[in-house]
Image: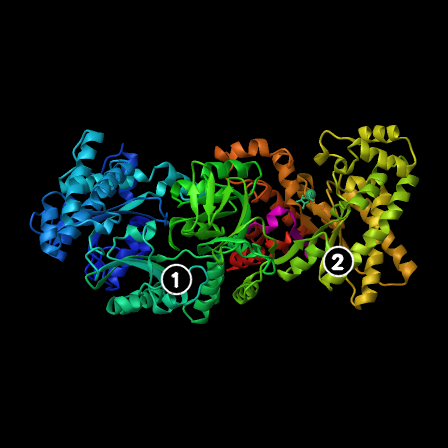
């Protein structure tokens, strides 16, 4: 087998398309080599070795060792060095690289190959002893940490004690001899604490590091990350071994990261940070504050530290040439790592950069306008669910801001919540329904669960590319990073700044767009949608086949839905129009009424309210279809429950509260979701459906008069199991329409259709379609009845089901294609067979879930209907389904 793939020196054995085998980093290092870019030579041990490793009791394929030795030789020759050589040693970095990028999840070892002998050679060859011993101590620290699992604080203790004894305050105060002493003490503490000497044999070091990379694939934090991002365990990671270039070789050396466009805003301009005389990890770790890359960015930030552009003009010019080439080649925004060694630029990584949704939209639209990608590509590149990020509220600009500190605007949006100082606490409080802001000095991969649970993240250390910033952007959470004036005291559970102290549990607000930390809870406003949002949604609309409607019960819902581009109302749940306090009393009167007369009296009070609601909805929707569903409450929900409520109803009905209480007991149900609801109500109490039909038709006449345009009305009957039920209700609706026409002299056009939300209705869809003019699949109830899982009681066991993998996803969130989906498919087929032009859609929660939207497209439905805020998500998902 082939277990090693070389790269560097203008050629490579791999290429970008071999990501599955070589991992993202390895594939792109190969691709950059093939493009002739300056990549330090090295080789990739492919993911197949990781798979072999775990399948064979953590052992390697037998040819691997010889292939690695040979590759080391070739790489050494390419750079004029030799691994382990006492005079001219090849030093390497060892890094992981999975197929999908797993930021911060896996570990890196730099300067590998250093020992007591080779460090002297490095010092001699670089004519710089301090550099050599600084590199050696970094290697010992990193290797001990990553490979030996040795705790960092041992080294910090040694270093602090030494600095105190010498009166030093900064690491830069230490000279070559100091670092040499430190290296000796590091080795002592390792020997003392672990019982073993630090390995001096470069080959032992190398295999230790390779083993550690493979081992880290199964660490708890990697496993958690994969679970959160749906990355299969079977993929494995590759290992990249690469000749070292040094960013810490004095002031003509540097290391940095850069994006070809701004990952927060999408602005088309090189964006990034670099550190002079530093090694890779220093930038990401946020230990020193990095410098700007471009002069323009330096001016904007007001930094007094020189930019790379002014400090290292040649390397900057080279970086500019390379980033433009990479972006053209990959046709996407790139996230690059580079090192400058004594003035010469080297590329260490490139990948498609993570970005906020706002940036993603701008980048996709601009790349398409620049002709680098097609409109289709642009539409395909936006994750529909991520649009949610844009719809997050921001702080009301007119609100008074009590700014306690400022940091970096690391991830946009604003959030308020209780201060928590640990990720476990964040997760715990979140599960209890609290909204929290996670406050940390800095975050690490161990904080992922806390970041997920938090509304927003605040750190006191670290830059725009720190762990907190990168991860928060990926999650779409607001984040302020590096708010350096804040002191966090984990022990006391306090945060203090400028003489003020906040405790855990106190409310703060962070503004991730401006980098502000504010005291208290701030009023929020709805987001302004950018021009790129409109442009991309417009492109999406050109491709999609499905129409997108909204579930809207109120004028406010309807207006929001229109703003987001709805093409109609797919579900108006009329019971929701009665939740308001004065109305619910009247509904209660109606429900507990003991005879038809009392019921009609209550209904007469409801009629004008309903009619006014509908007039308003019809006016707002201006000729777009509006599907109004007859009352479908689990009656139970509307019953008076407290003694106070019972007495209130009794007073209005002029009866004894005890009588009302009796009636309530009579109507109480064990299983309201499968009880007296839906069309059953319209059949047993026809006057209810009649009142609603009258309200709808009178409103239609009124709205037509006001707007000069007849509304497009679809009256919908809920919870139908048999064609019979439908026919009975439909006859009443038609009769009422005729009555209203007669009374008003107006004209009416409308359709009567049905929810299909019971398995029997799916199976009998052919029969039902003989009477119904349209179908709307109610996948909430269809999931409930298909699975036999109560919508209201699922939480207690659905969680464990998901955790155990018995169900892959919550079937109430994303449609169960195999089972419930099959019912929909059957219903659609049988319905269409009978009535070729049968209009069909869905209106369950699934209508706004991208995977379910794809399913609806495949089944050939005409539309999906979802909550107003998810209309853009559905528009985009529908377009992608059609690409
Ligand atoms: C459904 O059952 O999917 C539906 C849309 O109706 P409701 O959620 O109101 O029962
Ligand atoms: Mg339903």
Provide the residue span drawn in magenta: 836-850
- The residue most toward the bottom is 370
Q: On the rendered image, what quadrant is the N terminus found in?
A: top left
- The residue most toward the left is 87
Could you tell me which secondary element the residue under label 2 belongs to?
helix
- The answer to whether 774 appears left or right of 387 in the picture is right
**Percent of width and height locating residue 315:** 25, 66
Cα distance between the residues tagged 1 and 2:
44 Å
* Ligand 1 image-quadrant field: top right
Image point 91% across, 33% down: which residue? 655
**Percent of width and height locating residue 725:** 78, 42
Image point 56% across, 31% down: which residue? 797
Up-down: is 29 above or below 205? Answer: below
As drawn, the label of residue 469 is: none
Which one is nearer the viewer's eye here, 724 or 19?
19
- The answer to whether 604 appears left or right of 530 in the picture is right
Query: Can residue 852 be seen at all in this image of the molecule?
Result: yes
Q: Which circle's residue, 1 or 2, is located before the other in the chain?
A: 1
- The answer to whether 441 appears left or right of 109 in the picture is right
**Percent of width and height locating residue 475:** 47, 49
As drawn, the label of residue 617 is: 2
Could you tell me which secondary element the residue under label 1 belongs to?
loop
Read off the residue under disc 1. 333
Q: Is residue 157 magenta?
A: no
């Amino acid at each position: 087998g082939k277990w090693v793939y070389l790269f560097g020196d203008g050629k490579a054995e791999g290429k970008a398309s071999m990501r599955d085998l070589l991992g993202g980093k390895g594939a792109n290092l190969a691709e950059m080599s093939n493009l002739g870019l300056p990549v330090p030579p090295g080789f990739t041990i492919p993911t197949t070795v990781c798979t072999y490793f775990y399948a064979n009791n953590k052992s390697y394929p037998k040819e691997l060792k010889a292939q690695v030795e040979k590759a080391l030789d070739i790489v050494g020759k390419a750079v004029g060095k030799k691994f382990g050589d006492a005079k001219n040693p090849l030093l390497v970095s060892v890094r992981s690289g999975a197929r999908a990028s797993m930021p911060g999840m896996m570990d890196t070892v730099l300067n590998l190959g250093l020992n007591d002998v080779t460090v002297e050679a490095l010092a001699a060859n670089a004519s710089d002893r301090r550099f050599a011993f600084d590199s050696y101590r970094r290697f010992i620290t990193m290797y001990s940490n990553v490979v030996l699992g040795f705790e960092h604080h041992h080294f910090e203790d040694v270093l602090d004690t030494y600095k105190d004894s010498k009166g030093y305050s900064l690491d830069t105060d230490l000279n070559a001899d100091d670092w040499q002493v430190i290296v000796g003490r590091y080795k002592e503490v390792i020997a003392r604490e672990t019982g073993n000497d630090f390995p001096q044999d470069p080959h032992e070091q190398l295999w230790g590091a390779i083993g550690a990379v493979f081992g880290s694939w199964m660490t708890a934090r990697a496993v958690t990350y994969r679970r959160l991002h749906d990355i299969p365990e079977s993929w494995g990671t590759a290992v990249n071994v690469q000749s070292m270039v040094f960013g810490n070789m004095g002031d003509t050396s540097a290391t940095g990261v850069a994006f070809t466009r701004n990952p927060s805003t999408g602005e088309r301009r090189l964006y990034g940070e670099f550190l002079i005389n530093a090694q890779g990890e220093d930038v990401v770790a946020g230990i020193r504050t990095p410098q700007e890359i471009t002069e323009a960015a330096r001016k904007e930030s007001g930094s007094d530290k020189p930019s790379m552009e002014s400090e290292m003009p040649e390397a900057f010019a080279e970086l500019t040439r390379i980033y433009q080439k990479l972006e053209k080649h990959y046709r996407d925004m790139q996230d690059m790592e580079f090192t400058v060694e004594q003035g010469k630029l080297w590329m260490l990584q490139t990948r498609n950069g993570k970005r906020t949704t706002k940036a993603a939209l701008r980048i996709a639209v601009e790349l398409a306008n620049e002709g680098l990608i097609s409109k289709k590509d642009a539409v395909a590149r936006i994750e529909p669910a991520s649009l949610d990020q844009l719809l997050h509220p921001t702080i009301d600009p007119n609100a008074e801001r009590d700014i306690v500190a400022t940091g970096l605007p690391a991830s946009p949006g604003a959030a308020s919540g209780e201060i928590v100082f640990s990720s476990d606490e964040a997760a715990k409080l979140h599960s209890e329904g609290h909204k929290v802001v996670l406050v940390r000095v800095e975050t690490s991969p161990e904080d992922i669960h806390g970041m997920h649970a938090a509304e927003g993240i605040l750190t006191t250390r670290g830059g725009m590319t720190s762990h907190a910033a990168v991860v928060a952007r990926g999650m779409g959470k607001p984040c302020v990073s590096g708010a350096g004036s804040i002191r966090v005291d984990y022990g006391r559970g306090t945060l203090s700044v400028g003489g003020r102290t906040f405790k855990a549990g106190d409310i703060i607000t962070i503004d991730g767009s401006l980098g502000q930390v504010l005291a208290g809870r701030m009023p929020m406003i709805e987001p302004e949608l950018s021009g790129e949002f409109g442009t991309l949604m417009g492109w999406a609309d050109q491709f999609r086949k499905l129409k997108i409607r909204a579930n809207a019960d109120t004028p406010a819902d309807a207006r929001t839905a229109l703003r987001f581009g709805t093409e109609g109302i797919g579900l108006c749940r009329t019971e929701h129009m009665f939740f308001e306090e004065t109305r619910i009393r009247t509904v209660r009167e109606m429900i507990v009424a003991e005879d038809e007369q009392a019921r009609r009296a209550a209904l007469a009070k409801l009629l004008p309210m309903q009619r006014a609601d509908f007039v308003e909805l019809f006016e707002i929707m201006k000729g777009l279809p509006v599907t109004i569903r007859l009352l479908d409450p689990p009656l139970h929900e509307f019953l008076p429950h407290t003694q106070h409520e019972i007495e209130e109803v009794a007073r209005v009905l002029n009866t004894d509260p005890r009588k009302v209480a009796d009636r309530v007991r009579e109507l109480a149900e064990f299983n309201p979701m499968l009880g007296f609801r839906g069309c059953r109500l319209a059949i047993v109490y026809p006057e209810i459906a009649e009142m609603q039909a009258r309200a709808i038709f009178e409103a239609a006449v009124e709205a037509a008069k006001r707007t000069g345009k007849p509304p497009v009305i679809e009256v919908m009957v809920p919870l139908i199991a048999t064609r019979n039920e439908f026919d009975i209700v439909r006859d009443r609706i038609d009769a009422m329409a005729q009555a209203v026409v007669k009374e008003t002299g107006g004209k009416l056009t409308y359709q009567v259709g049905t929810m299909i939300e019971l398995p029997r209705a799916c199976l009998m869809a052919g029969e039902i379609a003989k009477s119904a003019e349209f179908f709307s699949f109610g996948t909430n109830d269809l999931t409930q009845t298909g699975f036999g899982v109560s919508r209201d009681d699922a939480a207690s066991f659905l969680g464990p089901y998901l955790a155990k993998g018995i169900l892959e996803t919550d079937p109430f969130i994303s449609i169960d294609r195999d089972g419930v989906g099959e019912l929909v498919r059957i219903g659609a087929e049988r319905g269409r067979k009978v009535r070729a032009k049968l209009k069909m859609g869905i209106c369950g929660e699934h209508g706004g879930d991208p995977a379910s939207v794809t399913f609806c497209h495949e089944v050939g439905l005409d539309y999906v209907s979802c909550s107003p805020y998810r209309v853009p998500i559905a528009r985009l998902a529908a377009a992608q389904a059609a690409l």
